[in-house]
Amino acid sequence: MATNILMPALSPTMTEGTLARWLKNEGDTVRAGDVIAEIETDKATMEVEAVDEGVLGKILVPGGTAGVAVNAVIAVLVEAGEAVPEGAAAASALPAAAITTPPAGAITTPPAGGSGGEAPPPPVPLPPRRPPPPRPSAGGAPHPIPPPAAW
């Protein structure tokens, strides 16, 4: 089964980066933990490790490409002997901006109310807050519960 390799977010604020170079070529066997590429951000160059095993079937974003959005498909990993899916070849012809997905942490929701487009129901109101229980006064007022007789 083919697995998309996505442009990683190397920091919480990263929205795009430069795919500096590939350290593996199409057709190379990849094991989990292998360093497959170098990504440059505005702050550093970092190595990207594979999280799955397989064969690097298709590189969709060539080395040296700047402005690659986080979560964009940059390559396809396939099992040994498996063909790269048809959609991967079409995606490689698109510019990186056209194959992007929302950045990490973005909140995406379906249309309000589901597929019909109707407004969602109003929020359920919370019950009123109860006041806190009275505190004993510092002036030595008696405690409402008497101590046990053994004291």
Image (spheres, rainbow, N blue to C red):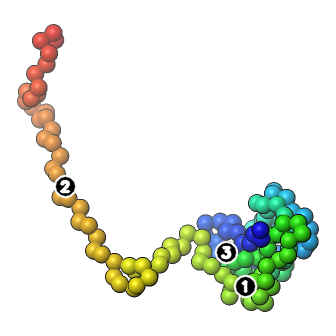
Q: Residue furthest top?
A: 150
Residue of label 2: 129
- What secondary structure is found at the residue carrying circle 1? helix
The numbered dot on residue 41 is none
Residue of label 3: 70
Viewer-closest of 28 and 43: 28
Separation of marks 2 and 3 at Cα, in angstroms: 44 Å
Separation of marks 2 and 1 at Cα, in angstroms: 52 Å
List x then y, in percent, for residue 30. 86, 63
Q: Are marks 2 and 3 in contact (CB under 8 Å)?
A: no
The kind of residue tagged 1 is: Ala
Residue at 17 percent across and 46 percent down: it is 132
Residue 108 higher or lower than 54, as above or below: below
Residue 49 shows in this picture: no
- What secondary structure is found at the residue carrying circle 2? loop
10 Å crowding of disc 1: few (<14), some (14-19), many (20+): some
Residue 100 as seen in the image, left or right of residue 82: left
Residue 140 as seen in the image, left or right of residue 83: left
Residue 105 as seen in the image, left or right of residue 34: left
10 Å crowding of disc 3: few (<14), some (14-19), many (20+): many
Quadrant that contains the N terminus: bottom right
Residue of label 1: 96
Residue at 55 percent across and 69 percent down: it is 105
